[in-house]
Image: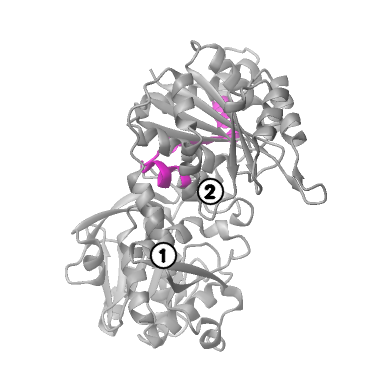
Amino acid sequence: MAKHIFVTGGVVSSLGKGITAASLGHLLKARGYKVTMQKMDPYLNVDPGTMSPFQYGEVFVTEDGHEGDLDLGHYERFIDENLSRESNFTQGSIYQTLISRERRGDFLGGTVQVIPHVTEAIKERIRRAAEQSGADVVISEIGGTIGDIESQPFIEAARQFKNEKAPGEVLFIHVTLVPYIAAAHEVKTKPTQHSVKELRSWGVQPDFIVCRSDHEISDSVRRKIALFCDVQPDDVLACVDAPSIYEVPIALHEQRFDQKVLGKLGLPENTVDLAPLEAFLSASAACQDQVDIAVVGKYVSLPDAYLSVIEALHHAGVAHGYRAEAHLVDGEELSDANAGEVLAGMDGILVPGGFGQRAFEGKIAAARYARENGVPYLGICLGLQAAVCEFARHVAGLEGATSVEFDADAEHPVIDLMPEQQDVEDKGGTMRLGAYPCAVVAGTRAAEAYGEAVVYERHRHRYEVNNAYRGVLQEAGMTFSGTSPDGRLVEMVELSDHPWFVASQAHPEFKSRPTRPHPLFKAFVGAAIARKE
């Protein structure tokens, strides 16, 4: 029977609940427990797939094709497990399911209410995550902040869930802000007190309080929080800003967080193995030199829009003994006229995924600059499509070549809508999503990077290379280094006469791990380092 841990947050958002939850997951797995994680989001969207990255950051895609919250990326990178669609659900999806059932007559004319129907549906999703994963411990993060009206059904469901279990089966961890007031030269506990008071008013008493701060949390502050929040001083933990998110598990372990949690859950401590994480941190700290990578996109005002890309670059850089610094470049401001100036000094150029025409011409300019100047290039999803359009225009002589996404009447639609997408009308959850196989062509850069004949990568797109143009592109010098096993879809392209120019229709960044960087990112960063040297 799985044990359950709920993680809540108070006062303000962006406190790092996801990192705290993922860090605990890492520690418990390091002690030999099978861990799965789950994010419950209170907004009414069915999933984040149609939401703006400007608001919520990247959409993370799981192996089974779920479009999830970016915290799933943190979870996967910290616990090194592939999560599923059961690992993320929204209040909107809960209501959608219930309303569909009501329309079918499943409730036999009864009144459908938040309690018990919504809360029971939430509890069912929590139970399902445990059953399908076979986990020893399920860590469920409740999105939003305590006090938000949207979060109330989730808090109530978690409260009921605990009451339905035996003592020691369920824990609550509350992450809260402890701000430093410069004028007073001290940290303040009132936000935490009020946050916990609100949580307790909903019937939930936290077992642990994790204090987020940019200053040291003294023992006296811990005791004060413990007194007012009815927890033991040892169960008040400090989570002070760290140079790297990967240091957080170590900091919490030093406070015996994992041991305390296991003690309250009645589970053996087991021996802990943090050697892989410690080796990664040591290697990261030892990096003296920097390799500079331009990431040309359109959501550059919010770095979280490219979170997995930035993390994958970091992982690859450490593997080579370098700090891989991602320089976000606004594709709207980039053109052939200024590409030389803007991209000068970059050791590599990466064009990530995205949707819509805005900044597309800037991405094409980035691909052209990389191709003509021998700069290592990695294209991801739309980054592949930009590279194909650029090559078609300036090498294959197909003037104005573009995607039908931007011009339905284009003379040279080198990127076309996938056949199975022709009649799709709904925007949400209808793309080519999740892991698909790719047959890698021997003797290519892709084959050299992967070292495997068939690989599985996660996808999120509607458009593909138009097969009608494969012949002319090949004749002009483009190599199709990866296709679907039946040869019907182009999955990867590259240029054989370039130091390193590879693009993937998939999103390899989603599968990178700190201790196991993704092969494409590792090869790309290696090529960038070679150019630098």
Bounds of the magenta segment: 74-100
Q: Is residue 415 in view from this perspective?
A: no
Residue 438 rendering spot, x and y as whole percentages: 26, 57
Q: Quadrant of the N terminus?
A: top left
Looking at the rendering, in which quadrant would you find the C terminus? Answer: bottom left
Residue 255 point in image, percent of width and height: 51, 35
Secondary structure beneath label 1: strand
Q: Residues within 10 Å of mark 1 (few under 14, many from 20)?
A: many
Q: Quadrant of residue 221?
A: top right
Who's the residue at 41% across and 47% down the image? Answer: 77
The disc placed on residue 332 is: none
Q: Nearer the viewer, mark 1 or mark 2?
A: 1
- Tell me residue 243's x, y (percent): 54, 55
User: At x 51% / y 59%, what residue is drawn?
Assistant: 306
Amino acid carrying label 2: it is Gly
User: Which residue matches tag 2?
Assistant: 49
Give the total number of marks visible in the rendering.
Answer: 2
Vertically, is 403 above or below 3?
below
Instruction: Considering the whole magenta stretch, tell me its main secondary structure.
Output: helix
**Mark 1 lies on residue:** 380
Which of pointers 1 and 2 lies earlier in the amino acid sequence? Answer: 2
Q: Nearer the viewer, residue 423 or 88?
A: 88
